[in-house]
Image (cartoon, rainbow, N blue to C red):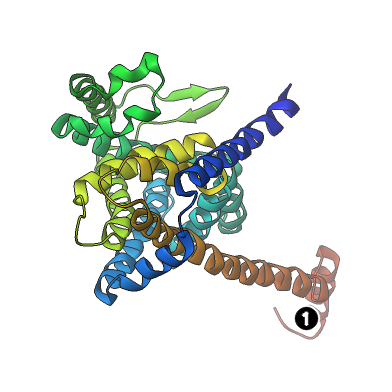
Amino acid sequence: MKRIFDFFWPLVGLIAVAVSLWLLYREFRGASVGPEVWEHLKSISPMRYLLAILSTLVAYAALAWYDRIALLHLGVRHISWVFISLCSFTTYAIAHNIGATVFSGGMVRYRAYSSKGLTAAQVAVLVAVCSLTFGLGTMLLGGLISVLEPEQLQRFGGFLPQYLKFLADPAAARAIGVVLLGLVAIYVIGSVFRFNPLIIKGFRLEYPSPAIAVRQFIAAPLELLGAAGIIYFALPEVGNPGYFVVLGVFLASFSAALASNAPGGLGVFELLFINAMPATPKVEVLAALLVFRLLYLWIPLLISAVVVILFERSKLEEVLHHEVHPAPGPEIKQQDQADRERAGFR
């Protein structure tokens, strides 16, 4: 049964990609997408490209903070910021493109952090805390937007089945926001009063200290604000719906893309985002999403590939050096000590 599920979720992700790409094809059928998108990409001013790049740096800096926060929760302080940043960057660049973020991120992190002395159990807790940090940030921002601007969920009304149409109603959206903020409040209370740890099949996850929780509630929103900023600055200034609209659509679309298990959310993310912004020309939204994929996904993936190659090369050199110059065994050390004593050394 477990082996069946190993293939089931990747298959679900591939089906989600195929269906989404087909629906996108229907959206743009008959339009000269390539030339129009290229024209919009060229029309983006250098300043807005620069702001989109800065937004990317903010997002990845916050992601590196995710790892730092998790390591502080574990009591690990001997790993440098440079190593943490490279590990985090590589982890998320690969995981965001491949999909199955927890699994793929866990594999990369274990390979990196085990070289610094962390156990498999510690890496598992680190991955869980990082995922929790992202979830808290999504609930916090999503809850605030649902409470303050509940009409935003109406943008996704066309995607909801009939029995879920009520969720697009502003009153229901506000209620959802209250629930999300309530879950965030419970987490804060659990952190302050140190509720009992969560234990699942021997896996133990302690509530973090209030100092760690505060860091989580800064880092996670910062990452999401930065990622949404890439799209906002890539959209045209004329007809731009505004940053908070882009943020709300981004949170919903990105979360749905992650839940779909589609590699990189390909197709799913674009389909939801484009249809949630009907007032903006579809080709312009598609161009902005291409900028997002380029800066947030594709370029980091290429850089991370170089980082992985260099890391694995250094590990291979260590192994080869160890084989060529093995550490002296006990008998060699004893013989060396005897020779030194005969020579008059102590």
Q: Secondary structure at mark 1?
A: helix
Residue sitting at x 57%, y 22%: 201
74 is higher (above) or lower (below) than 161: below
The answer to whether one can see residue 206 in this image is yes
Nearer to me, 61 or 129: 61
- Frontmost residue, 217 versus 224: 224
Residue at x-position 36% and y-position 73%: 42
Residue 240 percent location from the top left of the image: 21, 55
Where, by quadrant of the figure, is residue 278 drawn?
top left
Q: Residue at x 27, y 62 (%)?
A: 233
Q: Which residue: 81% across, 69% down?
A: 334
Can residue 129 be seen here? The reply is no
> Left or right: where does residue 148 sit relative to residue 108?
left
Which percent across, then down, holds residue 98?
A: 58, 49
Question: Extreme front residue here?
Answer: 30
Quadrant hosting residue 51:
bottom left
Position of residue 140 relative to residue 196, above or below, is below
Q: Position of residue 27 (x, y in %)?
A: 45, 44
Q: Would you call the spot at circle 1 few (<14 residues within 10 Å), some (14-19), or many (20 or more)?
A: few
Residue farthest top in this picture: 163
User: Three-letter amino acid code at disc 1?
Assistant: Arg
Residue marked by disc 1: 340
Q: Quadrant of the N terminus?
A: top right
Between 249 and 43, the one nearer to me in the picture: 43
